[in-house]
């Protein structure tokens, strides 16, 4: 019995040594996690992080910046205005258009602002449990990350359809060439370009699920700003699961408590029985 | 009375009766072990629920893992004790081994239930369901039912010797269900159940809800400490109390027989 227990102890003690190699599943991208607000944003390779406790700010080169924060204001419009005043102090611009989009990581409101002197500003807002999470993408090249739902994402002309739908959002008078250019790869994703006939802009397209992801850049710039999509798609919130943890603890207490109670009650009853039997034995 | 006690101290049955072991206060070793277990459990909960970092993908529910996984190994230890008890009873026919076997099954079922229930509660926010018929989960449920049937088998056989013999054989064979629960997620590529520690022979691409021990500060330490508590201290302490209880029950039964005889 003792040998058995000793062997079990040794076996159990050695078990954690089988822990999986952490490098095997290590995530190569840097992740920004807000210390209290439960949101997380991927920092693409080469980008610099200028975050403060109030908001997250990062820059890719000198041309693009991403701003993120959470706010508990009741109105999305107020959350956007507050964020804008922090991201671009002194600017007082109203959105051109808003649209609700269902993406793999939640429901977003896309907000298009008019073009600024410093470039193009596009915002995405996700509201969850009374908190608005605001992402603002600013590009000096005028690039905008746009997501457009597609009726048939697997159809042959889906990329062209996505490009046209996206361009219509910001420049309805521009006509794109029917022929796509050569695809290029940015951050592991292939983008297919459709250039405007007048050469003023290029729509870099890819399909994710049932949506077209289109980065519209001005003057045919290469889509370095496509990192916007990585940031948008990889944004995630830590779910609030404390209630389930509490339920789990209660369940453990109930199961172990029932076992202990059963042991105590049975022991007490047996002692009573023993005392009674002894009494009978003595009297007889 | 003394002669009766002498008869109860039957070597062949291994029963240590009289007023000593089962009726008196627990031995000092058991008292120390109990205090250590209670203190360690509190410390383990502090390490898991306070000190360890929050999993960014799962939130606080991931902390239930510090009980969920070790409690399975605690059940495994208890069911293993039942196997040892069964084998030794069949070899020696001493009652103490049957007592160990019965205690092992009862404590093992309780810890397996802890494992099962905490797993279901974890699954609700992570898998979006309380339960599914995944091979691992199904095997776990079958394991608990198999051992519940052990208790039913015992209560269904009147003859004590036959009961112990059948229960010993059943307890040994039932351990196959424990091994299946351990092995299934490691060899079946379609299981949704993640494997965080231990050897993996075939990785499942469908596994959801895993995490890395190095994911945030204190996770490895919290798991190690809770592993020792739930897989070792708690089952051993509970086994000891359950064995004392069964010894007392055997004493009472023997005394009842004597009183009836006299």
Image: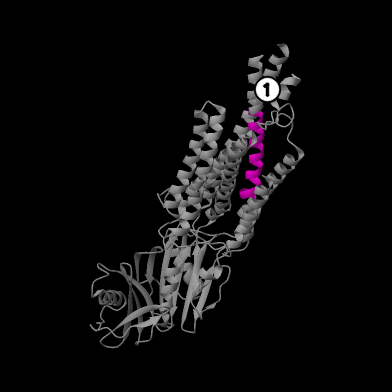
Q: Residue at the location (61% across, 49% down)?
A: B231
Q: Residue tagged by mark 1?
A: A274
Q: Quadrant of residue A205?
A: bottom left
Residue at horizontal 55%, vertical 34%? B165
Label 1: chain letter: A
Q: Is residue A129 visible?
A: no
Task: Give the vertical position of A127 relative to A121 (above or below).
Answer: above
Task: State the image quarter where residue B4 is shown.
Answer: top right
| Residue at image coords 37%, 86% | A221
In the rendered image, residue B232 lying in the magenta stretch gets the answer: yes
Residue A135 drawn at (x, y percent): 45, 70
Q: For numbered disc 1, what is the local secondary structure? A: helix
Residue A27 in the image, given as x and y percentages of width and height? 51, 71
Q: Could you say where residue A20 lies in the image, as x and y percent from the top left?
A: 55, 64
Colouring: one colour
Residue A214 or residue A75, whichever sits in front: A214
Q: Is residue A206 left or right of residue B90?
A: left
> Is B112 drawn above or below residue B4 in the view shown?
below
**The N terminus of chain B, quarter of image:** top right
**Residue A217 in picture, x, y percent from top left:** 36, 82
Q: Is residue B233 visible?
A: yes
Q: Main secondary structure of the magenta part?
A: helix
Q: Say few, some or many: other residues with alpha carbon within 10 Å of mark 1 (under 14 / 14 to 19 / 20 or more).
A: many
Magenta-drawn segment: B229-249
Give the side of residue A50 with respect to residue B9, left or right: left
Position of residue A270 relative to residue A53, above or below, is above
Quadrant of residue B142 within the rendered picture? top left
- In the current view of this chain or complex, which residue is farthest to the top? A284
């Amino acid at each position: 019995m003792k040998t058995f227990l000793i062997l079990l102890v040794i076996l159990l003690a050695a078990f954690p040594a089988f822990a999986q190699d952490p490098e095997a599943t290590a995530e190569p991208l840097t992740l920004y996690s807000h210390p209290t607000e439960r949101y997380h944003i991927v920092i693409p390779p080469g980008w610099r992080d200028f975050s403060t406790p109030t908001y997250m700010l990062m820059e890719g080169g000198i041309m693009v910046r991403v701003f993120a924060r959470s706010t508990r204001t009741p109105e999305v419009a107020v959350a956007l205005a507050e964020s804008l005043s922090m991201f671009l102090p002194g600017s007082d611009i109203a959105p051109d258009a808003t649209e609700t989009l269902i993406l793999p990581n939640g429901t977003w409101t896309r907000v298009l602002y008019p073009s600024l002197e410093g470039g193009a500003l596009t915002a995405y807002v996700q509201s969850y449990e009374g908190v608005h999470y605001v992402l603002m993408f600013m590009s000096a090249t005028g690039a905008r990350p746009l997501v457009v739902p597609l009726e048939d994402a697997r159809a042959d002309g889906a990329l062209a359809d996505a490009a046209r739908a996206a361009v219509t959002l910001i420049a309805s008078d521009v006509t794109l060439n029917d022929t796509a250019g050569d695809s290029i790869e940015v951050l592991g994703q292939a983008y297919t370009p459709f250039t405007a006939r007048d050469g003023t802009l290029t729509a870099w397209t890819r399909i994710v699920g049932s949506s077209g992801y289109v980065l519209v850049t001005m003057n045919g710039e290469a889509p370095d700003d496509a990192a916007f999509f990585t940031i948008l798609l990889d944004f995630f919130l830590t779910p609030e699961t404390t209630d389930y943890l509490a339920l789990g603890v209660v369940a453990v207490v109930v199961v172990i408590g029932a076992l202990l109670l059963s042991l105590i009650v049975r022991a007490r009853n047996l002692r009573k029985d023993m005392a009674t039997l002894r009494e009978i034995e003595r009297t007889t | 009375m003394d002669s009766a006690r002498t008869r109860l101290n039957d070597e062949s049955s291994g029963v240590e009766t009289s007023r000593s072991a089962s009726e008196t206060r627990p031995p000092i070793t058991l008292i120390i072990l109990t205090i250590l277990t209670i203190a360690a459990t509190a410390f383990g909960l502090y390490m898991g629920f306070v000190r360890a970092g929050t999993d960014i993908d799962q939130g606080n529910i991931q902390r239930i893992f510090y009980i969920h996984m070790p409690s399975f190994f605690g059940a495994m230890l208890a069911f293993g004790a039942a196997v040892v008890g069964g084998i030794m009873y069949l070899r020696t026919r001493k009652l103490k081994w049957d007592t160990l076997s019965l205690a092992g099954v009862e404590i093992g079922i309780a810890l397996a239930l802890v494992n099962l229930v905490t797993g279901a509660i974890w699954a609700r926010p992570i898998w979006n369901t309380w339960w599914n018929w995944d091979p691992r989960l199904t095997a776990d449920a079958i394991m608990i039912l198999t051992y519940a049937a052990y208790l039913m088998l015992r209560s269904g056989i009147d003859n004590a010797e036959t009961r112990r013999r059948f229960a010993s054989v059943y307890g040994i064979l039932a351990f196959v269900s424990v091994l299946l629960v351990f092995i299934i997620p490691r060899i079946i590529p379609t299981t949704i159940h993640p494997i965080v520690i231990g050897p993996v022979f075939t990785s499942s691409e469908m596994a959801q809800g895993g995490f890395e021990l190095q994911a945030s500060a204190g996770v490895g330490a919290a798991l190690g400490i809770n592993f020792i508590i739930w897989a070792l201290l708690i089952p051993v302490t509970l086994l000891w109390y359950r064995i004392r209880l069964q010894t007392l029950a055997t004493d009472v039964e023997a005394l009842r027989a004597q009183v009836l005889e006299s």
